[in-house]
Every structure is written in C-alpha cells, then in structure tokens.
Amino acid sequence: MSLLDTPIWEVIKASFTLEIWQRLAPAILETLYMTILSSLIMLMFGLLIGILLTVTSPDGLIPMKMIYSILGWVINCLRSLPQMIMIILMIPVARLIFGKSYGTNACIIAISASCIPMYARMVESSLLEISKGKIEAAKSVGSTNAQIIFRILLPETLPSLIRGFTVAVIAVISMTALAGMFGAGGIGDIAVRFGYMRFQHEVLFASVYVLAALVQLVQWLGNFISTRILKKRNLI
Amino acid sequence: MANHHEVRRNMEPIDEYIKISGLYKTYVTPNGPLEVLKGIDLTVRKGEIFGIIGFSGAGKSTLVRCINRLEKADAGSIKVGGVEMLSLSKKELLQKRKKIGMIFQTFNLFEARNVYRNIAYPLEISGVPRKEIKRRVLETAELVGLSDKLKDYPGGLSGGQKQRVAIARAIVNQPDLLLSDEATSALDPQTTLQILDLLKEINRSTGITILMITHELDAIRYTCERMAVLEDAQIIEVGRVEDIFNNPHSRTGSLFARVYTEFQRMPELINGAGI
C-alpha cells in the first residue's frame, strides 16, 4: 500500500493490522538486541575512556599530557566519521571477530565503535561538572586517587552520567536503524526494504511507531531515574 | 648522646607544633608569574586556635593548602608535629593527611552520601571495621549536634548544619590539626557564632590545634588566642589577638580600618557575642 495511490488515513489504518506487526515482531527483537548489547559495550568503554580523559587532563587527578592528547586526538578522529562510513570501516574488524562481515553481531561492533567516542566525551563533560572543592575535601582526608574516582567522582556525577547515557542510547537506536541498510536486520532493515524500496508505506509507518516509542521509553526512563536520584539527594 | 638524640627527635615540639619557614609559592598565570607567598615564617603552638587574617588575594588560602599539600609549595619548609610535610612520599602524605582535618567555605560535602556516610567517609577509606565506624560516627555526630540528621542528605541542610557535617567529617579520624579555610564566610552572623563556638568547644574537649584563616576580623577576635596578619604575600604582624587589636602595626591598622568600613556587621556581632 503506497502513499502514491492511497490516502494517508488508509495507510495509517493498514499500518495497524496484525499481519504487519507479525512481520515486524522479529525485527523489533533484533533492534532491541542490538540496542542493548551496543549500549552495554558503549557504557563500559565510554566510562573507561571518559574517566581516563578526565583524570589525565591538565587539571585532573593524575595529569598526563601525552595520554590525554593522544586520546583526545583519536576520539576526535573517530567522531569526525559519519556513521555510515564507520559501518563500512568496521567490516574487516567484524570479519576478524565473528568471521562474518554482516548481520546483527557485526553491526554491534560498528555501532559501538561509533558511539563509544561520543559517550566518552559525554562522560568527560559530566565528570568535569564536579566541584573542585569536593575533590579537595576527599584529598584532605587522605583518599587515594582510586578512592576519589570510585567513591566520590562517579557517585557525585551519577545523575548527569545517566542523562548522558540516555542521549547516547537514543543515538544507538537511530544508528541501529541505519545499520539495517547494511545487513544488520532490525526495524531499519524492514523499513528500508519493505517500506521504502517496495512502497509498502504502511510498514514504514509501523516502523516509525516502534522507533518513536522506543526513544520515548528510553528518554522517560533516563529522566525518571536521574530525577529520582536528585530528589533522594534533596537537590531538586 | 645517641639516646639523647632519639629522645629529642621523638619529642613533640609543643611550642612549634607547626613550623613554617621561608615558604614561597608563585603561580604561573597568563599575565606572568604571580607571587602569592613570599618567604612566610610562622609557628603555631600545640592545642591553640591560631588565626590568619588576610584579604582577598593576600595568599592565605594558598598558605593553608600548602600545609596539607593540596598546593605544592615552591620552596621552604613546613613541619607539622616535627614531620617535614614537603618531603613526605605520596604514601606517607596520605597517612599524614588522615591526621590533618580540613573544613572549607563551601563545605564541600558529598551530595551522593547522607550525613552519616559523609562523616563515615574518612573511616571507610581507611578500612575501619563497620561497627567501629558506627560508634565513632555516632559519637562525632553527637559532638557537633547532628544526631537527628544522620539520614538526611546535605542538599536539604542549612548552611550551619552543612558546616557541622563538614566539621564532623574533618574530626572523625581524631586528627591533631584542623585547618579551617574561611569556614564561616558563607554563613550569617548568628550561625557564624554557633560554628565558632563549636570549634572552640572541640578545641577545648579534644585539645586539637586549629589553624583558621579568614577575612573576618570578628571571627578571629572571637575565637583565636594568637593571630597573624597576611598582606601582599607576606606576614606583616604576628602576636596575641588582644595586642594586635588594641595596638595594631600601622599597616595592620589601615587594613582593619578598611574592613570596618566594608563590613558593617561588627556592632551586632559584638552585642550578640558580648566581646
């Protein structure tokens, strides 16, 4: 059913039929799988690199100009790549790891590689929000650097880290849709193959509903958790 | 002779509990070097409350931060209880810092932790057993008058309560020295008095040495026995608080005059405190 020859309300009505959603269901699962796994990988490495950036910065706990500069340079390079190019660049890496350059797992690598640098920068800016005074207070009672990072820096900036993660997960979702074009499967794949190439616009509509709902859900969850923490701490 | 030497080394220098000599510090700024400490010499006795007064840019904050090495001094010597702070290794410094508490103008409480866990933090990082932590936190909270606020988060406390938490956190390790960096400058006059009274009380009951820096004349006058005046990166006068207030050095006098006109709260404090 195409918008070219059918009124829009007919297409919308068709987008709610059982048959469409049965076709969409496995794709939704694939998208969820890609999103969750990529987000976890992004969280792990993004946090690690973000902490490293903050700690080694000239005003950080352990200033190390060399590491800080190299890390910053690599992140900027990776971030300058459009996501589509990143997917193509990661083909050999995926083949190396999974022995297969396409499919859901292969795309998780591309998505992570593209989103880790972004989330690392977000972590960095969250961690920089902490007041210098809190770090000084922690130092003044004899904290080691590791104690400052894990007992003060991360817990103090947790609401901001969560908000950053929310934005990053939404970027991951939009990238899974893009990766669909490159054999990753998922909603994006369905939307492009059926919704765009075969003019089945009701499928395109249904895909849009799913992606929108997913983004709403993630944003709501992120806001809910970070607000709850701030309320508990009596900060709002 | 060797024995005699040993004894002397282990003796706590009471009259020179803190001995700062020839301390220099210069910051590199985009506008060129800025000398903030130019050859500071200062001694503080064990168990006293010593005040350093200075106005913004005088270098007092840097001076106190050099003592626990939050700032790195360029040259000179700082001895605390006979130990040279500037030559401590990293590990030794962390141990020594556990015995030097510090409180700040902005309180610097950990907002992710409730009052109990703020006070417990210095003990937690030293691996003190849970039961012992609980006993000491409750005891310290009682001392600063916060027993009913332990579950509260700092975000919901008033300025005075926040500073009490900060004081409790600074003294829970039973340090020998408490550094106070403008601890009452963000508080209203009445709360300032309560905090100063608390510091005096802690000094009396535990014998802790307190080094407070401030720009508030009244705070020094109310709390300290001896004081130093810091101006333009140098100490221009040291002595008993009474003597300096009654008969200030001409430079000190002109500084005081400036502050008297800047801060009109002197009379109410005097009336309130009965100085």
Image (cartoon, rainbow, N blue to C red):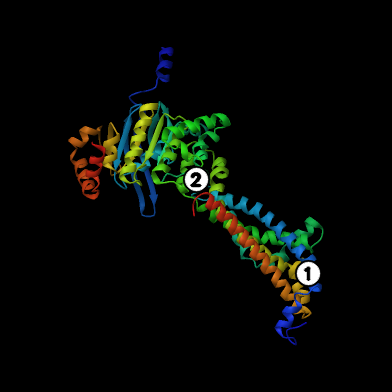
Give the spatial CA distance, label 1 vs label 2.
47 Å
What amino acid does circle 2 point to? Tyr
Q: Compared to B210, does A196 lie above or below?
A: below
Subunit under mark 2 = B
Q: In this view, does A204 lie to the left or right of B135?
A: right
Q: Nearer the viewer, mark 1 or mark 2?
A: 2
Q: In which quarter of the image is the N terminus of chain B?
A: top left
Subunit under mark 1 = A
What amino acid does circle 1 point to? Leu
Residue A1: mark in rendering:
none
Question: Does residue A42 appear anywhere in the picture?
Answer: yes
Q: Name the residue rendered at 36%, 52% in the picture.
A: B32
Viewer-proximal residue, B2 or A36?
A36
Q: Compared to A37, does B187 lie above or below?
A: above
Q: Name the residue under label 1.
A: A24
> What is the x, y in percent for residue A183?
78, 67
Q: Is residue B154 left or right of residue A207?
A: left
> What is the x, y in percent for residue A140?
46, 38
Count of all numbered marks drawn on residues in the image: 2
Q: In which quarter of the image is the C terminus of chain B?
A: top left
Q: Name the residue rendered at 69%, 59% in the picture.
A: A112
Viewer-proximal residue, B97 or A212?
A212
> What is the x, y in percent for residue A69?
56, 54
Residue B153: mark in rendering:
2
Viewer-proximal residue, A207 or B13?
A207
Q: Name the residue rendered at 71%, 60% in the picture.
A: A35
- The reply to whether label 1 and label 2 mark residues of one chain is no
Question: Does residue B88 appear anywhere in the picture?
Answer: no
Q: Compared to A48, does A141 lie above or below?
A: above
Q: In this view, does B106 lie to the left or right of B58?
A: right
Q: Compared to A58, does B250 lie above or below?
A: above
